[in-house]
Amino acid sequence: MSRKEATRLLTDHAEYGHWELDRLSLLRDGSRRVRLRRRIIRQVRATW
């Protein structure tokens, strides 16, 4: 997978799936390993 395709895929996951980048590892052979995690969406408490 090219770098441009990977960037597009990660951007789509982040925008539509509520994911965020957790860890990015650069390996010795020059490849990258990306770990995503779900973004925590906190509810605002209603003040009645």
Image (cartoon, rainbow, N blue to C red):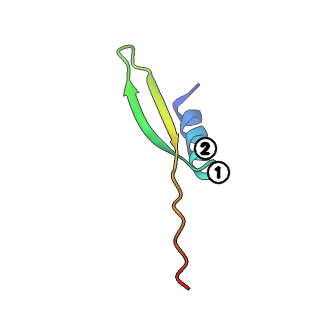
Residue 31 quadrant: top left
Q: Which of 12 and 3 is in front in this view?
A: 12
Q: Is mark 2 on a helix, strand or loop?
A: helix
Q: Which residue is drawn at 40% across and 32% down?
A: 24
Q: Is residue 46 left or right of 32 when viewed as pictured?
A: right
Query: In the rendered image of this protein, does residue 22 appear above or below residue 39?
Result: above
**Real-space Cα distance between discs 1 and 2?**
6 Å
Residue 34 drawn above or below residue 40: above
Name the residue furthest bottom: 48
Give the residue at mark 2.
Answer: 13
- Graded by Cα atoms within 10 Å as few (under 14), some (14 to 19) or many (20 or more), the crowding at tag 2 reads some
**Viewer-closest of 36 and 11:** 36
Q: Where is residue 43 in the image (x, y as percent from the top left)?
A: 54, 65
Which image quadrant: the C terminus? bottom right
User: Residue type at mark 2?
Assistant: His
Which residue sits at x=41%, y=34%?
Answer: 23
Pointer 1: what residue?
Answer: 16
